[in-house]
Image (cartoon, helix red, strand yellow):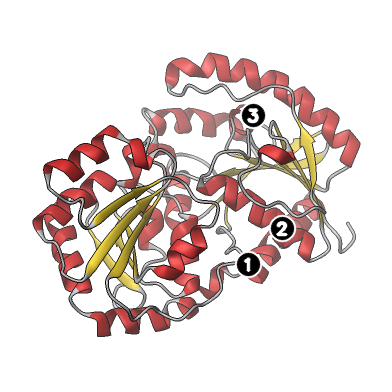
Amino acid sequence: MSDKVRFLFHFYDLEQRAGIQRAICELSNALVEKNHEVAVASATQHASMAYHLDPRVQLLLTPYPEYKHSGIRAWPFKAAWALRQTSVIRALARQVRPDIIVDHGTALGLLYPFGTLDGIPFVLQRHFPGRSFPCGGLLYRLLSMVCLSKVVVVLTDGIAHEMRSLGFRHIIVIPNVIPVEAKPASWPETEPRIGLLLGRAASPQKGFDLFLRALAQSQPPGWRFVIAGPGVESHPQLLELVSRHKLSSCVSLLPATNDPYALIRQSSLLIAPSRYEALPMVVLEALSIGRPVLASDAEGLREVVIPKLNGEIVPAGDVDKLSAALMHLCGNPGFLYQLAASAPSSIARYHRKEVVRAWIELAMRLDATG
């Protein structure tokens, strides 16, 4: 293999405004910035993409859309999809001749049991631990028995530990890459200060309901709170909680935005009360910009949010402790300023050059052993 590595990434679609789509686009962009070659196989056309993809990244359209349902009953349908998709990826690989194929968490990756595809190293990237899904622990334990020599890339040490406990043997930790737009910006001093929550409303994962219940217990003066993301502005439960607890004067529910960085820069605190997480892009982006984070102790959050250095951690699902931490942070702007000042330097391992280097080292190692 030459110093230039050719990657083929595969994912269902790049049109949803979610962290995994942003992570794939940013990794692709970071690799081509360093003169490596990247092709992305997806069912999404350029015009429908949610995030910017460098023009040097080759977008390859796949004909079969994602099977939308999940759970054990959906797996026969996912298996049928994966069988068809394997032939598609094999044809695309012959076209672009990659040095490594990376499947980003689709059924194709889980159902293809070997470490190569036509002699090309074939790697999975899993964005969540197996137990995050219904019956996930059992399912992943069964899958580990057929994965044989397949390398699995995960985002955090905690997820790596869990995957090994489920029987996976070849686990590599490579975190998400921080987007280039997430540059440090001065912490806002003006009032009302803004607390920000970002994410999709459709899933209870993000814990927006927990936050609103916590806020109802203690509404810090001089603060407004913005919850933004796909479906947030019309989500029945969020609207009902805002109305029931009379929070409309201090809470805004906003739709997804094309520029999350503008919201982050305007905020003084990012709040991530998730019930479970992998390694959320928005937390990395906020810390890189210089915004402290109040987060639950969900897996991916506890590895990046460091109490008294760049934020605070509370037990996942504990409304009372979330409320108390919110009052403490919002009532101490001097402490928040200190956290904001140290936030960017606290996440050096997630900077673009470090993540790119890790992927290149993995590709070269697999090529040397293949």
| Helix, strand or loop at mark 2 | helix
Residue plotted at (48% across, 28% down): 142
**In terms of image quadrants, where is residue 110?**
top right
The front one of 269 and 101 is: 269
Mark 2 residue type: Asn
> Could you say where residue 352 lies in the image, as x and y percent from the top left?
64, 67
Mark 3 residue type: Leu
Contact, mark 3 vs mark 1 (Cβ under 8 Å): no
> Could you say where residue 149 lies in the image, as x and y percent from the top left?
66, 40
Mark 1 residue type: Val
| Helix, strand or loop at mark 1 | loop
Residue denoted by label 1: 180
Relative height, residue 221 to residue 297 (above, below): below
Contact, mark 1 vs mark 2 (Cβ under 8 Å): yes
Local crowd size for mark 2, using a 10 Å CA cut-off: few (<14), some (14–19), many (≥20): many
Residue plotted at (59% across, 52% down): 23
Q: Is residue 314 left or right of residue 281?
A: left
The front one of 132 and 32 is: 32
- Give me the C-alpha separation between circle 1 and circle 2: 9 Å
Q: Is residue 18 left or right of residue 71?
A: right
Relative height, residue 316 to residue 76 (above, below): below
Relative height, residue 19 to residue 91 (above, below): below
> Could you say where residue 92 lies in the image, as x and y percent from the top left?
83, 33
Q: Which mark is residue 108?
A: 3
> Could you say where residue 324 lies in the image, as x and y percent from the top left?
13, 64
Q: Is residue 83 left or right of residue 20?
A: right
Q: Which mark is residue 342?
A: none
Quadrant holding the N terminus: bottom right
- Give me the C-alpha separation between circle 3 and circle 1: 30 Å
Q: Is residue 170 visible?
A: no
Residue denoted by label 2: 29
